[in-house]
Amino acid sequence: MVGAYKDMKFDKTPYGGFYTQNDIKEVVAYASKKFVTIIPEIEMPGHSQALLAAYPQLGCNPDKIYEVATKWGVSEDVLCPREETFTVMQDILTEVMALFPGQYIHIGGDECPKKQWKESRFCQDLIKKLKLKDEHELQSYFIGRIDKFITSKGKKMLGWDEILEGGLSPNAMVMSWRGTAGGIEAAKLNHDVVMSPNNFFYLDYYQADPKTQPLAIGGNLPLSKCYSFEPDLPELTEAEAKHIVGVQANLWTEYIGTPAYAEYMTFPRALALAEIGWSPKRPKNYVAFSDRVKKHIPVMDALKINYCNVDLK
Ligand code: ACM
């Protein structure tokens, strides 16, 4: 897909790729030298269309011809919670856990439409058999089994805030992306949370008037808005707030085709994220922050970082 989503233009060029085990080892070793731990995300039960194109027996309709996606977004084609699916996902996770030495394994859990589960006799029978209320509880059953598996291997499972919807799995850590509500709910349930609200930390969003910027997915996230995020949320008691273990910015790359553009979207907004992450609780002063950011201009220039300068003038 090329250009804006609404234009539905395609260049017919296959897009894709993969990492070998050796590639991953190289990336993990490089990151480790920089004191960075890489957390892999193996998405399930949604965002699995490519897996279904290769292994249609993992879907709700094994006779369906599942195609590899040609556009970005949410797909109705999702994994079916059959024993065979769990076997395959556990095999994949076993291979992944051996490659990534860090404590956390992200299993996605976001954006899983329930249409195919509603229409599937297998899923409806399973809901009855397990005495579940609905398809959201079926998703929690799916995630709960994966949580048990990951926990049994001594690792910790992370998932997006949708994993709260049918009941949160006992050992899950939550990344709150649809604003802060999911993170607040999880913290109140005594689960650890990473705050990654899209309205503050989605670095694929525009940082200035779209007319003046390279094509991006949408949104409106200038540096000042990014900096204004307050992790000490008034909804949380001091004890609950301890469950907010950090903040995260997401740079999804549907529209980001080059490392230079990735840098452009990341800087200077990453500086705001960093300061929020390491600062003690205190009132924010954007003007003072802005002065500090300007001191980074010569540093970013020396490092040849392709930062966006609209908020640095
Ligand atoms: C997400 O942006 N779907 C986590």
Image (cartoon, rainbow, N blue to C red):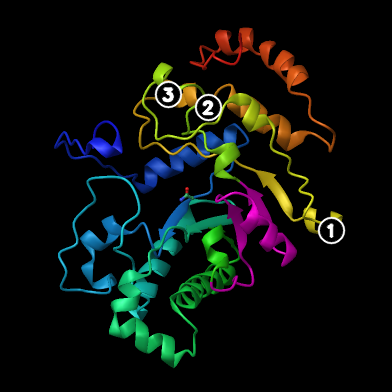
Nearer the observer, disc 3 or disc 2? Answer: 3
Q: Callout 2: helix, strand or loop? A: helix
- Label 1: how many residues lie within 10 Å, few (<14), some (14-19) or many (20+)? few
> Could you tell me how far apart the alpha carbons at marks 2 and 1 are, in whole angstroms?
32 Å
The quadrant holding residue 290 is top right
Where in the figure is residue 43, as x and y percent of width and height? 42, 57
Q: Which residue is mark 1?
A: 239
The quadrant holding residue 56 is bottom left
Q: Which residue is mark 2?
A: 266
Could you tell me the amino acid type at mark 2?
Answer: Thr
At 39% from the left edge and 74% from the top edge, which residue is drawn? 86
Comes first in the chain, label 3 or label 2 = 3
At 84% from the left edge and 38% from the top edge, which residue is drawn? 281
Q: Callout 1: helix, strand or loop? A: helix
* Span shown in magenta: 166-195
* Residue 5 lies within the magenta run: no
Could you tell me the amino acid type at mark 3?
Answer: Pro
The CB of the residue at mark 2 lies under 8 Å from ligand 1: no
* Residue 174 lies within the magenta run: yes
